[in-house]
Amino acid sequence: MLYVGCSGWYYNHWKELFYNGIPQKDWFKYYAKVFDTVELNSPFYHFPKENTAKTWYHQAPKYFVYSIKANRMITHMKKFVGTKKLIKDFYKVTNVLKEKLGCVLFQLPPSLHYHEEKLKEILDQLDRDKKNVLEFRHPSWWNENVYKVLKKNKIMFCTVSGPNLPEEFVKTADDVYIRFHGKENWYDYNYSQKELKEYAKQIKTLKPKNIWAYFNNDANAYAVKNALVLKKMVTEEYKS
């Protein structure tokens, strides 16, 4: 399956660029007509409540799937130290999404460098029944030992397109997860047709069971435009 969408749907600067001036209360409904998935970033800033997750579940069409970003208390403040209960509580919230839950994304801070012990500490706390994704922000994590350990544990290594990070397409599980933040500028970058075409080719080469691709370059609604183009290009690649 191919899941391509944006990292969030609630951006005030998309009011005219994407939502064509429709009322805010109808933004998600409109978004869900264009895309079949979204990456929820708000839980990173505010630990979500089960009632909020119920709202997400009921507002979405049957075909819609959410990927959800873990709270920063886990990843950035405590940096996975003593977070077993926090992670368990976060998973409990994600369970409310039932069949509409896609992946659970854990984004590590740039200050966290690779250490074999730290990787083990992280993996020991993850629920293997979930589609877990680790997004690293320090280049030291792009190494064969990390790939090997994640493959063994069937955890997705998040392919990242962002400034000063290796743009290497990595597959460590059946599925592949990709985040597009902007090559030269965080969140303010418009991917060219040529760049998106190359990404589509690389995705096909990996032969994933499912593809999860989210655009976080929300400035000027680039995310919407780029996501629609990539989805079309990947579909065409698989037809060829």
Image (spheres, rainbow, N blue to C red):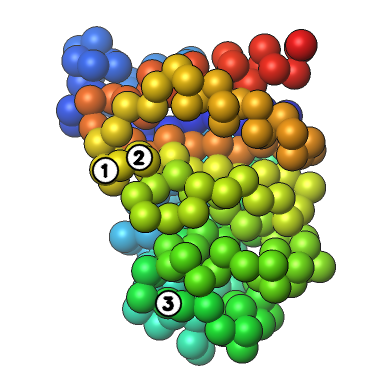
Tell me where residue 33 appears, x and y as whole percent.
48, 15
Quarter of the image for the N terminus: give it: top right
Residue 121 visible within the image: no
Q: Which mark is residue 112?
A: 3
**Number of the front mark, 3 or 1:** 1
Q: Which mark is residue 204?
A: none
Quote the CA–CA distance across marks 3 and 1: 21 Å
Tell me where residue 92 appears, x and y as whole percent.
58, 64
Along the line of sight, the residue nearer the viewer: 148 or 54 = 148
Q: Residue 182 carries which label?
A: 2
Task: Classify mark 3: residues with Cα within 10 Å, few (<14), some (14-19) or many (20+).
Answer: some
| Marks 2 & 1, CB-CB < 8 Å contact | yes
Q: Which mark is residue 185?
A: 1
Task: State the SS at label 1.
Answer: loop
Toward which corner of the image does residue 72 lie, by quadrant? Answer: bottom left
Tell me where residue 215 appears, x and y as whole percent.
43, 35
Choose the circle earlier in sequence order: 2 or 3.
3
Along the line of sight, the residue nearer the viewer: 132 or 25 = 132
Residue at (76%, 68%) from the top-left corner? 148
Residue 184 visible within the image: yes
Quote the CA–CA distance across marks 2 and 1: 5 Å
